[in-house]
Image (spheres, rainbow, N blue to C red):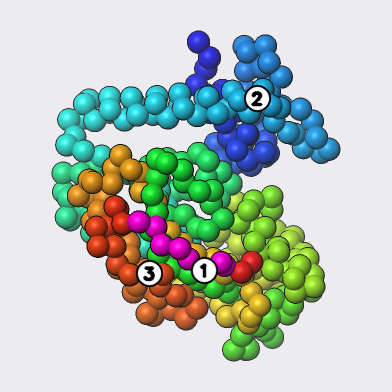
Amino acid sequence: MLDPVKLRVLRSVAATGSIRASAEALGYTPSAVSQQLSALRRETGVDLVERSGRGIEITPAGAEIARAAGTALDALDDVQRLAANLREGRSGTLTFAYMTSVAATWVPRLAQDVREAFPDLSLTLLHRDCSVSELDLRGDVLIADDIDAEPGADWQCCDLLEESYVAVVPSSHPLASHDSVALSDLAEIPWATDDPLDSTWFARILSACHAAGFSPRVEVNPPDYSAVLGFIASGGFVSVQPSLLEQNPPPGVVVLPLRSPAPRRSLQVWVRRSSAKNPAVQFMVQRLWAIAADHAERIPGITLLGGPPQTAATAPRTSAAPVAG
């Protein structure tokens, strides 16, 4: 029998197209990822990846095995969740997957509301790293943005909001005294970002910078966002981040609106269809929309999309206007 661990590595590499990105997503070293792929190649007798320039490319055979592995691994995850529920004697479980930009503001408030309304529910919070492909979806409810893949037949969506990006600059920099800045104002300053530079998240920002006539000079790329803020506060770096992420900047950091043209993005809530009639799921979707509405009312640059879901998770997806950047 093939090792599920090795199959998860292959699926991640097939989704990200990068050994480095997969290592970050899985918590491994790049060397460990390469070793797992080599071992799986020996077990299957099939070439799974091949060199392409300075990176790797999944082979057609590797892509087929990764797709088949995805179905098997999802089924195994379902069995493991069932066994855990039976072993712990819990009445039910719900997994909510979230992204960094809502981690500090939405998630604590949402978790408290859900646990107060459903005290016997086991709520699991799962952080979605931006290097993880959205082809590998986990959980019952998750927050996604407009660059994520279409969810497919197993998922349904409800649009929440569209938001702007902001410039994050040192309070000691001359730009800090401005009411707003253009992207081009950041062209000559070193950048810090926690987004993997080969990710679709950073590609949106990069595209906007190219449209403004420059390529950002990224000199610091730590995996931890708090480290990014530390570099900015030191006085030598700037960053561009979603507006939701920058509501309470630490000392030494100033957040400035970006003048148009600038990147924007929309956020949606995705619900697994098999969980859509769960009262806790429906409650969670309603609370997410209410939190989004509150932010849209208080934070400049955020626009609410659509209205509150009448039947929460079973509401059809609305069609959002194309998002620039």
Residue 58 is drawn in which quadrant? Answer: top right
Question: Residue at position x 21%, y 26% from top?
Answer: 86
Residue 260 coordinates in the image, percent (x, y) = 64, 80
Whether residue 18 sits left or right of residue 272 in the image: it is right
**10 Å crowding of disc 3: few (<14), some (14-19), many (20+):** some
Which is closer to the viewer, label 3 or label 2? 3
Q: Nearer the viewer, residue 64 or 229?
A: 64
Q: Is residue 321 magenta?
A: yes
What is the three-letter code of the residue carrying label 2?
Gly
Q: Which residue is mark 1?
A: 321
Q: Secondary structure at mark 3?
A: loop
Question: Residue at position x 79%, y 70% from top?
Answer: 214
Question: Residue at position x 50%, y 58% from top?
Answer: 145
Magenta region: 316-323
Question: Residue at position x 40%, y 76% from top?
Answer: 296
Q: Which residue is mark 2?
A: 62
**Nearest to N terminus: mark 3 or mark 2:** 2
Instruction: Give the main secondary structure, helix, strand or loop, of the magenta stretch.
Output: loop
Q: Is residue 322 magenta?
A: yes
Residue 76 coordinates in the image, percent (x, y) = 40, 24
Q: Secondary structure at mark 2?
A: helix
Q: Which residue is mark 3?
A: 306
